[in-house]
Amino acid sequence: MVGIRDVAKKAGVSTSTVSLVINNSGYVSQKMRDRVSAAMAELNYIPNDLAKNLYKGRTDTVGVIMPTIQHPFFASLVARIQHYLDVQGMRALLCSTADQHAAEMQYVDMLQRHTLDALIVGSHSQLSQEYWEGINRPVVAFDRYLCDSIPTVGADHVSGGRTVAQALIASGAQHVVNIGGPRSRFHDRDRGVALLNSREMSSRPDSSFPTVRYQLVMEDELLTAGIETEYVPVEDLSDMALFLRAAERALDDFEDVDAIVAPDLAAAAVVQEALARGIRIPDDLQVIAYDGTYVSAFAGIPVTSMTQDVDETARRLVVHAMQEIERYAQAEKSAEGTSAALAAAREAASGEMTSSEHKRYVSVQENAQGVPYRFDAVKLSYVQRGTTR
Amino acid sequence: MVGIRDVAKKAGVSTSTVSLVINNSGYVSQKMRDRVSAAMAELNYIPNDLAKNLYKGRTDTVGVIMPTIQHPFFASLVARIQHYLDVQGMRALLCSTADQHAAEMQYVDMLQRHTLDALIVGSHSQLSQEYWEGINRPVVAFDRYLCDSIPTVGADHVSGGRTVAQALIASGAQHVVNIGGPRSRFHDRDRGVALLNSREMSSRPDSSFPTVRYQLVMEDELLTAGIETEYVPVEDLSDMALFLRAAERALDDFEDVDAIVAPDLAAAAVVQEALARGIRIPDDLQVIAYDGTYVSAFAGIPVTSMTQDVDETARRLVVHAMQEIERYAQAEKSAEGTSAALAAAREAASGEMTSSEHKRYVSVQENAQGVPYRFDAVKLSYVQRGTTR
DNA sequence: GTTACGCGAGCACTCAGGATT
DNA sequence: AAATCCTGAGTGCTCGCGTAA
């Protein structure tokens, strides 16, 4: 392997000069620059970034860990994350948790071994709050709460659920079926859902999966309006075949359903099944896709849907990731040798945010203490298409 | 940062002993092992992999570069690739080429700077054959020809095209519309399509995009059978909205169409459009999705489709990638200092393959010379569903 | 010969500080 | 004082070789 030394020797300069030429920095005369360049070309020299990484303690790589990349929503999200990382001169190391056992811990390990500069976590973690708290390296969560010190970017599912409920009420729906994930995860917290922009709390216990809040709020509102709601669970959201079965079940089990709210793929399945059964949409049955991706546009009938702003979400995730990287870098520098690194990082946390950024953070009262858990909410948008009236 | 030396000091041993404990290798007494472990725990030591990478010249990371990860086909492929890499203790660095300008070269660069151990290329490269030839590091191509020294894994599109044609002929189709990518890429080679398992050549010039062969062969066969064929191009396969428009165009421009062959998303769009227009499927119009992913199952009517074995494709891509990594590692070792590294790598190429593996390689005569260009063909399967009769 | 451990030269690059003009 | 270049001490881990029981 031809190294920087070989180039230096051939060009008759020191290795540091070659380094300066490579990085195009510092004081190097044009003459030298040319001579070094010539030597590099002649020897077919290519710098080895591994040495650079070692010295700098960085790899410019962030781990992106999601449940399934197969699902169009996550595929789009990952694609946009990768894009924004690229803009920052960073790269994405991909991990879909679905088929991997201890994938999360494995990636956290890479983070701590400095193979990764940061972690963007969108998977459903089994790891405890304390575990995440103890990591002390750059982590950003997507649509889920990990611990107070880790910022979250997610959709404003509370108002999302309310919007859907209102649309259904306005359309005169009487019997709504809701298709979603395992019900067990719905109420794993002991406090009620904090309703954004108000001091109210929903009467039902909150979930640690922010997404679920749309279901909680929606059911709440529908109930209040005197509309019947049924729930059809899909055990494994990464298994596509299950969506088709859920669709059948929804139509089989409840004869007088007149509206179905479901994840996009399930919604597409519902449309398919309804068409096959000769059910008229939207006259006899309305369908709304929650988290509608492009798939809901390709269904038998274009499906009305509540869509997340994937691009904006990705952008913010990357912004936060970069901020966290910077934060911890600062902390490490200032705490040189001291074990106060952690404390310093905490300090920097609040300082880093501009006041305008600060306002955007909607503290969902996840934590009773004064610690400012940062939840960055992205707006959802309701797209009216052919399956609602 | 607490390093291996700190641990060694605290445990009263040498750094090499600590290293042995970390890697669980070599001769270390249980007593020492315990003492070292204790010290590691006490100091909260976590090994820094960057140093290891530097020494070993490896990162256990392979770059996976695809056109769009948004498209369900590539999403699935990437997911499976990542899975099989994981099995090998490797990780996937993701890159979708779509929005990135010089993405390919950038990743090749990372490969040469040893940030990547190998590259799996599924994007549509603008780079010349000579460029790829000159890289001299582990690269595997998906469904496209890069150069003789780079192995390719791809579907057997020739028989795929033939199967579709025969199905259409048997069903009595008279006027077929074919939706696909830009026509300009269809005949960028000067020789005919080599038909697998025979010495025949198609009368039409070949394409450097193996996928296109299904279109060439299909059109050929249909033409021979006296069936009219039209072509509706989609300019950008990464833009979903264009599929919908292509579907409209196919039905607008050709009134008496009775069969449409299209990429899965376009096929779904065709079904949607047909349903909206009251066209009966499959009685008045048959639809076949080529490269049918799960989306074709979620369309308004489940679409008959020609599907690739994504899992097997991914598996083989990874197998080849690992083989290439090993090959080049051997070459580098044996050619210590000699510039015969390249030659050695070439040598190893043929030796690495077992005879049974060898048989699977279908040399598509891409190259007239004796160099064994390796093309590993994966079978396609025809799935009959509701849109054909 | 086998088991157990330490020494120290790498690995390829970066960068602060010194020397020179 | 400013521009230019070099010296050499890191960066943290690996592994061949040496020693010793």
Image (cartoon, coloured by chain):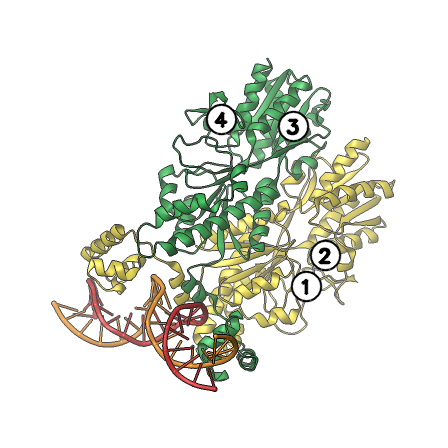
Chain colours: A green, B yellow, C red, D orange
Tell if the residue under mark 3 belongs to the same chain as the one under mark 2.
Answer: no
Q: Residues within 10 Å of mark 3 (few under 14, many from 20)?
A: many
Label 1 SS: loop
Q: Residues within 10 Å of mark 2 (few under 14, many from 20)?
A: many
Identified at 74% across, 65% down, the residue is B189
Residue A126 location (% of width, % of height) = 41, 37
Question: Distance from label 4 to label 2 (Cα)?
Answer: 57 Å
Circle 2 chain:
B
Q: Amino acid at mark 3?
A: Ile
Label 4 SS: strand
Return the residue at label 4. A194
Q: Amino acid at mark 4?
A: Ala
Return the residue at label 2. B213
Q: Mark 3 touching mark 2, by CB under 8 A?
A: no
Residue A91 location (% of width, % of height) = 53, 55
B285 up-or-down from B108: above or below: above
Q: Which numbered disc, 3 or 4, marks the residue closer to the eye?
A: 4
On screen, residue C1 versus residue B221, left or right, reads left
Q: Amino acid at mark 2?
A: Arg
